[in-house]
Image (cartoon, helix red, strand yellow):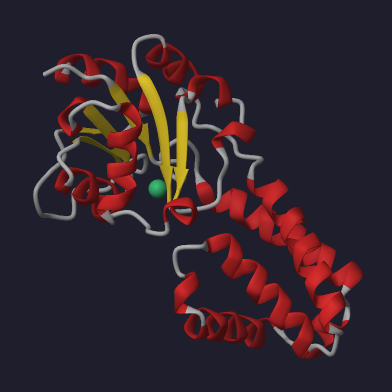
Amino acid sequence: MTVAAITFDLDNTLWAVEPVLRHAERAQQDWLLANRPRIADTFDPPALFEFNKSVWKRHPQLAHHVSQMRKQMLYELQLMAGYSEEAAHSGARKAFDVFLRARQQVEFYAEALEVLELLAQDYTLGALTNGNADIYKTDAAAYFDFAFLAEDIGASKPHPNMFQAAVERVGVPAEQIVHVGDDPEHDIRGARNVGLRTVWISSNGEAWPGGPRADAEITNLGQLPSVIDRIH
Ligand SMILES: [Mg+2]
């Protein structure tokens, strides 16, 4: 079986996402505290959490558009705190920009860049993410030939459209593409349903939760080149 391309999930596949999100949320919060202080007077943290949940519930059409959802949340939050529509619009844009800039400051897993550089010599590499990380704003930019965000496609993994977009972009049969990801449902089941080969990465050493297994399982990206060789 020839391998032509490898697609990667990003969060928790190439880097740990929790520290990045914590950092980005804090940057956004700092901006709001400095520029929209009435929000902190109106909402304590539990109320803020409930309010954010209510925005999710009221805007199901934004479920696959995480960036728009966050901007909507920021917008409504400012209106609730008594700011004008104009202030809320510009504040949502600015606070989101602050969030997004911090969101791209990822710290790759130790072996990631070396492995991507190596694989990029022989394969087309793509990124498929449900989040709003931009691989082209990271140190791995040069290794990637394409990247699809769920918000570009209008559907999130495990939806077949995400994987079909990759198949169309590479222009080879699905079985010549290997998808690498940490989420058994989003990444492994989703990719397998479209006919891609799959590699499950469990960086924390979790056990496979059940159901049809990936073609290969790894605990460290350093193991990926030999696994790809074997599939190839
Ligand atoms: Mg992931």
Quadrant showing the N terminus: top left
Rendered position, 53 above or below 168: below
Give the vertical position of 68 relative to 41 (above or below).
above
Number of numbered discs present? 0
Q: Is residue 29 left or right of residue 18?
A: right
Answer left or right for 60 relative to 94: left
Q: Is residue 205 visible?
A: no
Q: Quadrant of residue 36?
A: bottom right
Residue 137, given in percent of the width and then of the height, sits at 64, 34
Residue located at (30% from left, 51% from top): 161
In this rendered view, identify the residue nearer to me: 23 or 147: 147
Q: Is residue 29 visible?
A: yes
x, y (%) of residue 86? 85, 77
Position of the C terminus by quadrant = top left
Q: Residue at x 30, y 17 (%)?
A: 225
Image x and y of residue 151, in percent: 49, 56
Toward the viewer: 171 or 89?
A: 171
In the figure, is residue 120 to the left or right of 73? left
User: Can you give x and y, in whole percent of width and height, for residue 57 in the image?
Assistant: 48, 84
Q: Judge by depth and name the residue closer to the eye, 158 or 27.
A: 158
Give the answer, above or below, for where 38 lies relative to 191: below
The residue positioned 60% from the left and 39% from the top of the image is 106
x 60%, y 55%: residue: 21
